[in-house]
Image (tube, helix red, strand yellow):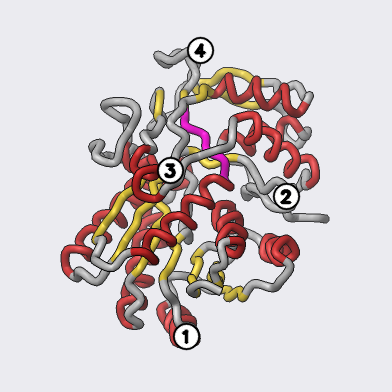
Amino acid sequence: MKNKILVTGGAGYIGSHTCIALHEAGYDIVVYDNLSNSSHEAMNRISNLIGKPIEFIEGDIRDSESLKKVFADHQFFGVIHFAGLKAVGESVAKPLMYYNNNVSGTITLLEVMTEYNVKRLVFSSSATVYGDPETLPIDESSKRSCTNPYGQSKLVVEHILEDLAVSDSDWNLITLRYFNPVGAHSSGQIGEDPNDIPNNLMPYISQVAVGKLSQLNIFGNDYATIDGTGVRDFIHVTDLAQGHVAALNYLEQQNSALGFLPINLGTGTGTSVLELVTAFSEVSGQKIPYQFADRRAGDIASCYASADKAQSLLGWQAKLSITEMCQDTWRWQSMNPHGYDTV
């Protein structure tokens, strides 16, 4: 067995898929999650898929005493930090909640990591830190500026990590900037299960396809793109999970200080909203009724990654296609029309 890793937010969408990838790569994992936007059922299903129970601790990253107990009880090699709120619209309505959870929570985690001398972190950041990009594709040196409190909370954490690396050269900090995670585990057992109405496009499409929602609203059809709808870099969540394994492997190989290392995880290809709707309809055999609505504040026309740095440093690249993203999402959604709520 490889080193032991603490996975904060490990019961969530990306965290749950990464737990499976970490197990398959031989890592020993402990999951710490407050279940505010995730389900204990996800942990049960991960355990079934990997054939063994995962140590799970219910707790909040803002609770330093709870975190200290976890660190005192385990010898961690490092932390993968997913725990955070992630709905753009909600962040605009409730900015204090987002800064409290995403920024204050991360500070508490870093303080406890410092106390227990665990100084390797893989941070779950986002392409939203790039704001409205000046050039495409977006590489890691692109200017950072945010159009909403969610993105701003990720950017503030990135600045904190940069300052931490300057203050103490023992820290090795990889921040992974995700583009648009979609898809589900190929078994159909775990996937994206948003509370209430989905904030992200793919679960919204899949819930329309399964009859849970009546139609899709497409925000804006007058962008300067291939068909007027927004263009995004959709990446399969299992490819994303492998990116975290690659980042940990990279940390294991380092003999000298890395400091702060930002890396994009994306496919490098943009797909429009309408192209995704068409692909999903073809895969599922379901008609996806949609209507156009006004652009949303803070939305941008196009956003896709340069993933060259991930390939050259980590030896990682996205492998799965839009068709496979749609197939796996539809398998998850049709097998679990109500997500993890089996009632």
Front position in the image: 213 or 307: 307
Which element is circle 4 on?
Answer: loop
Q: Is the residue marked by circle 2 packed among few (<14), some (14-19), or many (20+) residues within 10 Å? A: many
- Decide which of tag 1 and tag 3 comes sooner along the chain: 1
- Decide which of tag 3 and tag 4 comes sooner along the chain: 4
- Looking at the rendering, which quadrant does residue 337 occupy? top right
Residue at x 49%, y 38% (from the top left corner): 180
Image position of 119 (left or right of 244): left
Residue at x 78%, y 24% (from the top left corner): 285
Which of label 2 and label 3 is nearer to you?
A: 3
Image position of 105 (left or right of 200): left
State the CA–CA distance, disc 1 to disc 3. 33 Å
**Which residue is outermost to the left?**
167
Res. 276 visible in picture: yes
Q: Is the residue marked by circle 1 packed among few (<14), some (14-19), or many (20+) residues within 10 Å? A: few
- Decide which of tag 2 and tag 3 comes sooner along the chain: 3
Image position of 234 (left or right of 260): right
State the CA–CA distance, disc 3 to disc 4. 25 Å
Front position in the image: 201 or 280: 280
In the image, the segment drawn in magenta is 232-237
| Residue contact at pointers 2 and 3, CB within 8 angstroms | no
- Decide which of tag 2 and tag 4 comes sooner along the chain: 4
Residue 227 has which mark? 4
Per the image, the residue denoted by label 1 is 69
Q: Is the residue marked by circle 4 packed among few (<14), some (14-19), or many (20+) residues within 10 Å? A: some
Which of label 3 and label 4 is nearer to you?
A: 3
Q: Amino acid at mark 1?
A: Lys
**Percent position (x, y) of residue 209?**
74, 30
Per the image, the residue denoted by label 3 is 265
- Decide which of tag 4 and tag 1 comes sooner along the chain: 1
State the CA–CA distance, disc 2 to disc 3. 26 Å
| Residue contact at pointers 2 and 4, CB within 8 angstroms | no
